[in-house]
Image (cartoon, rainbow, N blue to C red):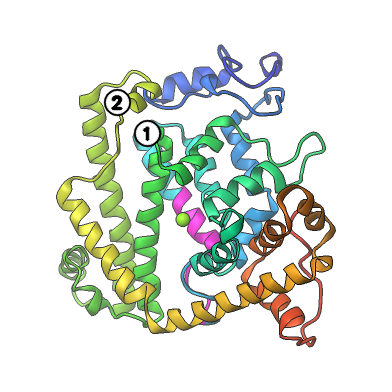
């Protein structure tokens, strides 16, 4: 496999099978693998996987990615097993993002890597856990799941003898950094993942909230976008049952927005006539829904915020979870000897507080509960050790 020789990086894939494939399939404004700025630790090109394909695989095989299955999205494990976890949400985002990327002839491999990475830094208990950790680390740089994703893939994940972290491509790290800094114009692949994220959680949260009986389908009908789609569905499937209607609505909420996004984007991109990914960024081009559609999305999100995310059942669960995170943090700070060796060593480079925060952030909801019971609440009935510390896993 001659073409696999040489290091990955700028021009590494020029003239190879990958270059030929991308030249055929991608639009001029897409991100091309041959233009990648490479990896921090140079690696030889792979014989049959492109750089972003490798990045995607590295994320999927990481410990932090697997732990997403034990982390809540909006609703906790005790509330049932129908609703999304952070892992299934991530797959839904990747699925939607790939659909959009393919339709717009963008780099699907890059989009998939970015999508699978986007929530990898979530601590236990979703945004509630994030708020609690941020508060605990207020005097030590704070905590954000987006920034922690970078810490994980650049430092904490240990799967390779030659380098720390996953040594992902520059463009993947840059895309994740955009989620934190929000400056400049991200490449189209990054924008697509961002939009796919909100398309995915808006639809999923409607589905889950109705299934969990926090809000009824009729109450969601107060939202104009939902009312429109429900009217269409009721007309098309006369007499359809409530649970099937809920599922059809979920599908319609995704399909409607994805279709509008693709149609609008195609039109705008064609009119702009960008000849490169750089041209898109220099022009400050943003993929957007047209005004009326965006207003409907804003109404749906405002409703979800008021009626679902601030629902009494969630508020009390979140408050208790935050108390457990805070208590565990202060306990570990007072007893750093309880940190697994890897995290204890991190104290030298990031300080005691961050080392404690990083250890907690890597935990699943269940493991965090158990550590809290064992160490803080002093309940030893559940002692066991089926989850060892994050990086040494
Ligand atoms: Mg997300």
Q: On the image, which quarter does residue 181 sit in?
A: top left
Asked if residue 183 is positioned above or below residue 282 in the image, the reply reads: below
Q: Residue at x 23, y 24 (%)?
A: 272
Tell me if residue 83 is in the magenta stretch.
Answer: yes
Q: Residue at x 67, y 64 (%)?
A: 360
Mark 2 vs ligand 1: CB below 8 Å = no
Q: Which residues are magenta?
A: 79-94
Q: Name the image quarter holding the N terminus.
A: top right
Q: Which residue matches tag 2?
A: 283
Q: On the image, which quarter does residue 100 sit in?
A: top left
Q: Main secondary structure of the magenta part?
A: helix
The outermost residue toward the top is 15
Residue 367 shows in this picture? no
Q: Does the residue at mark 2 contact the one at mark 1 (Cβ under 8 Å)?
A: yes
Q: How many marks?
A: 2
Q: Residue at x 55, y 59 (%)?
A: 87
Residue 97 shows in this picture? yes
Crowd around label 2: few <14 · some 14–19 · many ≥20 (10 Å):
few
Asked if residue 196 is positioned above or below residue 270 in the image, the reply reads: below
Q: Name the image quarter holding the C terminus.
A: bottom right
Give the left or right position of residue 242, taking residue 363 as reference: left
Q: Which residue matches tag 1?
A: 185
């Amino acid at each position: 496999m001659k073409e696999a020789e040489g290091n990955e990086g700028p021009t590494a894939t020029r003239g190879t099978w990958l270059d030929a494939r991308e030249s055929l399939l991608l639009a001029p404004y897409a991100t091309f693998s041959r233009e990648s700025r490479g990896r921090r630790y140079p690696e030889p090109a792979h014989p049959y996987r492109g750089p972003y394909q490798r990045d995607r695989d590295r994320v999927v095989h990481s410990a932090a990615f697997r732990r997403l299955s034990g982390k809540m999205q909006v609703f906790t494990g005790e509330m049932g097993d129908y609703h999304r976890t952070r892992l299934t949400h991530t797959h839904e985002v990747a699925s939607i993002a790939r659909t959009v990327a393919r339709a717009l002839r963008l780099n699907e491999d890059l989009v998939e890597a970015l999508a699978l990475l986007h929530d990898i830094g979530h601590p236990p208990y979703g945004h509630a856990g994030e708020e609690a950790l941020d508060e605990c680390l207020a005097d030590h740089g704070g905590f954000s799941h987006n920034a922690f994703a970078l810490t994980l893939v650049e430092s904490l994940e240990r799967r390779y003898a030659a380098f720390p972290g996953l040594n992902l491509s520059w463009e993947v790290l840059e895309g994740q950094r955009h989620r934190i800094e929000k400056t400049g114009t991200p490449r189209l692949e990054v924008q697509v993942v961002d939009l796919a994220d909100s398309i995915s959680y808006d639809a999923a949260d409607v589905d889950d909230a109705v299934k969990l009986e926090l809000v009824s389908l009729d109450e969601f009908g107060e939202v104009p976008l939902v009312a429109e789609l429900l009217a269409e569905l009721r007309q098309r499937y006369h007499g359809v049952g409530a649970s099937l209607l809920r599922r059809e609505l979920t599908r319609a909420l995704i399909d409607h927005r994805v279709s509008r996004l693709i149609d609008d984007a195609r039109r705008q991109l064609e009119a702009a006539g960008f000849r490169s990914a750089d041209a898109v960024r220099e022009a400050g081009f943003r993929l957007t829904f047209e005004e009326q559609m965006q207003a409907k999305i804003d109404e749906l999100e405002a409703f979800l915020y008021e009626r679902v995310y601030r629902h009494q059942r969630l508020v009390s669960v979140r408050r208790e979870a935050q108390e457990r995170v805070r208590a565990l943090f202060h306990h570990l700070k007072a007893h750093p000897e309880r940190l697994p060796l890897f995290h204890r060593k991190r104290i030298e480079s990031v300080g005691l507080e961050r080392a404690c925060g990083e250890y907690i952030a890597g935990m699943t909801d269940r493991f965090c509960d158990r550590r809290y019971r064992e160490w803080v609440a002093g309940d030893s009935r559940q002692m066991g050790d089926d989850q060892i510390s994050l990086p040494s896993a």
